[in-house]
Amino acid sequence: MLVELLLLVVILLLIHQRWTKRDIYKLGEQLNCGVRSFPLIGHSYLFMGDGLARMKAFQIMGLDALRKENGLTSLWLGNRLYTVVADPEAADTILKSISEKDDIIRMASVFIGNGSIFAPVSIWRPRRKVLVPTFSTKNLKYFMTIFASESQILAQEIGNTVGNDPISIFKYFTAYTMDAIARTTMGYNMNAQKDSNHFFLKGFDMGLNSFAERICQPWLHSDAIYKNLPLYSRLMKHKKEIWDFISELIRNKRKEIKEKNMTQEQYENSAESHQTTFLESLMRLSGGDDGYTDEEIVEELLVIMVAGTDTSAVGAAFVSVVLSRYPEIQDKVFEELQEVFGDSDRPATFEDLPRLKYLDAVIKETLRLYAPVPVMTRKIEKDLYLPCGIKLVPGSGVMINIWAMHRNPRYWGDDVEQFRPERFIDAQPTHPAVYMPFSYGPRNCVGYQYAMMSMKTMLSTVLRRFKFLPATKPNNNAEFPPLRLKFDIMMKDEDGFQICVKPRSKVA
């Protein structure tokens, strides 16, 4: 009798859910996903396992969207419906109309807080107004001097390991970006390139990996469950160490500013204003002691570090692997570097970077095929009609599948899988939303120039001294095996971005 009663309750609950979410279920039927889903779990089974499985799931759903005329399909994570988008027309409408990120992304707040990348619109909008000026040309010129000095250390560190054995180039790029971002954000010399045991590095990495695991596993979405797991306790330990560390730097900077006792006008006319970190910019631009609290500054600094460290390191690492497989393209990059720098090892300057047009195209084409952020989400809070006639409804979410968008043959041609940098020189993409490695719309990445400058600087410095060779041999058809991609916040190479490095001989 009890079993029958429980079964009746479950059936009634399912009927009630089906009725209250009838518009959502109707949308799911219209999208007509070609990938099998199951009751209660939906497509969650695709995401079970490691980072390879998670990335494979995103690829499967993206390819299903590309098969449709409208470039849309449905994804069920448990009882949550996402409209997967691989069409730029639909993406343009969505990203220009909706700025609220899906609730699933806000799980990052457990570690990062309400930093503007993950924050609700009510927090993001006023903070963005303060963030944009921190990426001014004056600040970027100062940051460039830091990129240049840290990239010199990068080249030295790579040189210390040159041999016949493959190396993980990502390891070196990550250390470089962490040192560069620590100096540009906080004015702190982390020295990660010389010492990889800094507690900040380990805690930072653990926090990002925990977030990636959680968002792809619906059974971890409940705070009641997640906060009772051992993983959560370890995460909180690392979070406390990192937040305490940054908070101390903030207190010291506030004290330093107070002791100088300069008005904003005096500061802007002083030499110091040309060497300003993100930390000091955020303090001054938000209103000094009456502006952002210490907690708000920690949140924004962490967001800049998340975006600035992994994005640049992953992007440059993918460029390195690709160049190792295409020696003729690497030779063209080197020829351009010789035109700009000659045979010198001098540090790159702010004025050098715009002249590196072919390297710029190589980076952009790499980011097309291997966008570090392969998907992004939005929350539907009111009815939204897409150009194809599909109506998105409240209570559902949207997942822009950037990996698939960048492979849409209607816009890129039949050679979408071919690495061809010239496509960014001969002609620009035929729709602005078909290429979005740094997002798109009002919530696009404000640090786009910062990331591109960082990548160009490290690559131009290293490629002048070393030649990249493949770690694996091509098969009988002279083709390399495809990269094994994984997802852990960023899309990465499962095999660690392995390449061989050979010193270039100097021209006499």
Image (cartoon, rainbow, N blue to C red):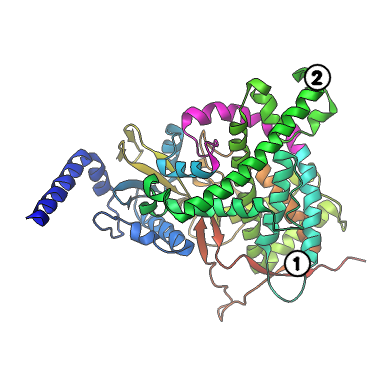
Q: Which of the two marks, 1 or 2, is nearer to us in this view?
A: 2
Foreground of the two, 448 or 397:
397
Sequence-wise, the earlier of marks 1 and 2 is 2
Q: CA distance from mark 1 to mark 2?
A: 48 Å
Badge 1: how crowded within 10 Å, few (<14), some, or many (20+)?
many
Q: Is residue 446 above or below residue 154?
A: above
Q: Residue at x 80, y 31 (%)?
A: 274
In the rendered view of the protein, which quadrant contains the N terminus? bottom left
* Residue denoted by label 1: 467
- State the residue in front, 67 or 110: 110
Q: Amino acid at mark 2?
A: Gln
Q: Is disc 1 placed on a helix, strand or loop? A: strand
Question: Taking 197 as reference, is 186 above or below it?
Answer: above
| Tag 2 residue | 266
Q: Residue lying at the far left in this picture: please name it.
A: 1
Q: Identify the residue shown where x is 23% and y is 56%.
A: 39
The quadrant in which the C terminus is found is bottom right
Give residue 456's position: percent from left, percent from top: 71, 50
Tag 2, which secondary structure?
Answer: helix
275 relative to 80 in the view: left or right:
right
Image position of 211 (left or right of 24): right
Give the prevailing secondary structure in the magenta stretch. helix
**Residue 24: % across, % down:** 26, 42
In which quarter of the view is residue 462 placed?
A: bottom right
Q: Is residue 121 magenta?
A: yes
Residue depicted at 67% across the width and 46% down the height: 452
Query: Magenta span covers which residues?
Result: 112-141
Is 2 placed above or below 12 here? below
Could one spot residue 286 in this view of the protein?
A: yes
